[in-house]
Image: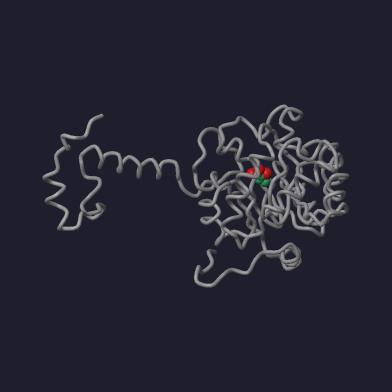
Amino acid sequence: MSHSSEQPLERVTIPALQQWKDKGRRVVMTTAYDAVAARIADPIVDIILVGDSVGNVCLGFDNTLPVSVAMMNHHLEAVARTRPHALLVADMPFLSFHVGSEDTIRNAGGFLQRGADAVKLEGGAKRIEMVRALVDCEIPVMGHLGLTPQSVNVMGGFKVQGRTPDTALRLLDDAYRLQEAGCFALVLEGIPAELAARATEFLTIPTIGIGAGPDCSGQVLVLHDVLGLTEGHRPKFVRAYTNGFQLFQEALSRWAADIRKGAFPGSEECYRLPDQLRDAVANWVPSSSTSR
Ligand code: KIV
């Protein structure tokens, strides 16, 4: 449901998300990497994620590994300038939370100083120490488990996770540990629906699924995927609600065709000289004293 644009929307907060889980209200989250996308999404969604997916979706990389803190800062600042009502979450990119807690706190703290309400980071047990360090500094953390794109090399590709007894139970264990370490929500990506349902049932914090079935507390998809702006292989869990790529190309083609046949710009798209200047301009010739 889209909200009315007439009155300012109430800001989404972390305690509100917790209450929504308790009441069974589903959370809607999408990505934005710039002000245009943020303005499109904000009246409709509850959480805006400045995702490191900016790397593959917008910057032409094959995966998210090349995305740096500086890149994230650039995109986060653009989104934050729109002052969204949605909870604004910034993704911690690869290597920004692995080296040590001081480095992690500075990177995440920098995101909050740029307007993020919270950060998201990928990983389970190995990242608990960093999650604790951030929470201790009043930096809210959203966890991210399952098909975590920053682990693409370890996973041997973008593959569904949690399908063996070992990995399924470890995921549940990691989910619990992240909650106990202070995460306020958890993204569950690319895992069997039953596993996500079980995590959602026993965790008190909300779960947000992407390729994790319908029984999460909410859902997230990359905005460009929902709008049909991404080309190439589309994972099974993506539902595109329009073919934005084709729609935009059709509009651009009509504009190009109008230019080529002299139909753009029309007279209503032109500025005009004041009447008293028209003769002077029409009769202008280069001055003979002008030398180049
Ligand atoms: O970077 C991203 O867009 C994400 C979401 C897909 C969860 O991590």
User: How was this image coloured?
Assistant: one colour
Q: Quadrant of residue 248?
A: top left
Between 151 and 188, the one lying in front of the other is 151
**Residue at left offset 76%, top offset 43%:** 145
Task: Residue at 56%, 35% (x, y): give it.
Answer: 59
Q: In the figure, is residue 202 to the left or right of 261?
A: right
Percent x, y of residue 82: 56, 57
Q: Is residue 267 above or below residue 26?
A: above
Q: Point out residue 221 in the picture as x, y percentages from the top left corner.
A: 61, 48
In this image, 3 relative to 70: left or right? left
Whether residue 75 is visible: yes
Q: Quadrant of ligand 1?
A: top right
Residue at 50% x, 71% y is 6
Residue 211 in view of the camera: no
Which quarter of the image is occupied by the C terminus?
top left
Which is more toward the observer, 38 or 159?
38
Place of residue 238 in the rendered image (x, y in percent of width and height, measured from the top left): 58, 44
> Residue lying farthest front?
289
Measuring from the top left, give residue 152's x and y in whole percent: 71, 31
